Image (cartoon, rainbow, N blue to C red):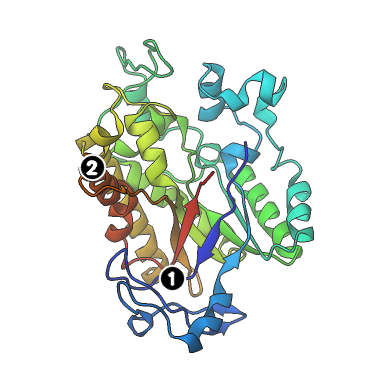
Amino acid sequence: LPSPTAAMRMAGGRTEDHAGVFRPSAPADAGLPRLISDQDYVGAGAAPPADRLADLELIMLGLGTAPSRVEEAHAGDLWLSWSEKGNVQALQEAEAGKNPGERLRFLEEPQVEIDLAAEAGVTIFRMGVDWGRLSPTPPASERERLERPGCMSRFGGGLSKVFCRSRQPPADEDQAQGVIDAEALDRYREVVGLAKTRGMRVLLTLFQNSMPPWLAQLGGWSYSRAVDYYVAFAQDVVYALGDLVDFWATFSDVNVYLWRSTCAGLWPPPPDDEVLGEMECFESERYAQAVENVVLAHSKFYNWAHFADSDLHQPRIGIAHGVAWHKVDNPLSKLGKPLRTIRKHFQFGLIDAIKHEVDWLGFNYHGG
């Protein structure tokens, strides 16, 4: 599957609204932009003065990958099991060959993609870690819940006795479980180190469409303890890779992921309840709950990295947001209200919620 190239603009710090304009300042250390302060903010509708146009050099273009698109499948790979039910056309044998789970073999042969990126002049390499690969088994308190008789779901179409979802955490909550597979984490460190030896900075994405299968069974981002599990996992990754990573993305395209999984049932894990249309989704409680948990997860990780004992020196944490601009040529069109709903709940709601807790802001634009 093709992975999008991410264009990152070093915004961050504080924003007033999604229509604001930022004036990046000069780099502070090692050619990296400093965090943006309130003095850099221009305001909605304004433009940077001519003498600051040179700051546009701080826009960095690089190459981006995602675990579910380039890594070999693992035992609990949600996307492989989803494709085996015929839900991912690009992973069918006619398109992907006899072994679609191999993808680009990025973990086994990372030098192929990394060398191509370096030869193309890329200076920042964006990659991710697969949460499901690093945390393949559930904590003990969840295991009993998952094995409870009668747990049903419509995973992949038709009823399957595998999922048991609830927003209520177990009564005997244990400490949130982080990374389990230390060997896989060591391999990620080797891959990140390889990119660094090729002269590229690394932007590491912590979540892009990949989650542990057991968490998917519990409801994914709609499950109340997903926040704690994510933060514990992210902290373990920081402890292992923090000295090598230049930029951290807590999420990438998560608004798209929540819509296509939580509501539309097009991506795993699908909803237990009825599939919702686009407008119904963005105004639904289930979507709002999932977004709320994502916002809280980002906030907790951001504040831990900046203000707790995270061992990160000047952390640069942001989010890569899936964006597209919709407009109606005729202001009297009946599409006016739906577009306002899209912009409020899908395009800008999540970003507005974390606007005081980002050091940079990335945009993923999937256009054609």
For the point 36% across and 48% down, the residue is 326
Left or right of 70 in this view: 173:
left
Residue underneath mark 2: 333
For the point 27% across and 71% down, the residue is 16
Q: Is residue 224 visible?
A: no
Q: Name the amino acid, label 1.
A: Ala
Left or right of 282 in this view: 191:
right
Q: Position of residue 67 (x, y in %)?
A: 59, 42
Q: Position of residue 91 (x, y in %)?
A: 61, 25
N-terminal-most mark, 1 or 2: 1
Q: In front: mark 1 or mark 2?
A: 2
Q: Check disc 2: other Cα within 10 Å, few if <14, some if 14-19, many if 20+.
A: few
For the point 69% across and 52% down, the residue is 191
Residue underneath mark 1: 11
Q: Name the amino acid, label 2.
A: Ser
Q: Position of residue 200 (x, y in %)?
A: 69, 65
Q: Check disc 1: other Cα within 10 Å, few if <14, some if 14-19, many if 20+.
A: many
Cβ–Cβ below 8 Å for labels 1 and 2?
no
Left or right of 280 in this view: 322:
right
Q: Which mark is residue 220?
A: none
Give SS at disc 1: loop
Instruction: Establish if 243 lies above or below 56.
Output: above
Question: Toward the viewer: 184 or 65?
Answer: 65
Q: Position of residue 130 (x, y in %)?
A: 54, 42
Left or right of 218 in this view: 361:
right
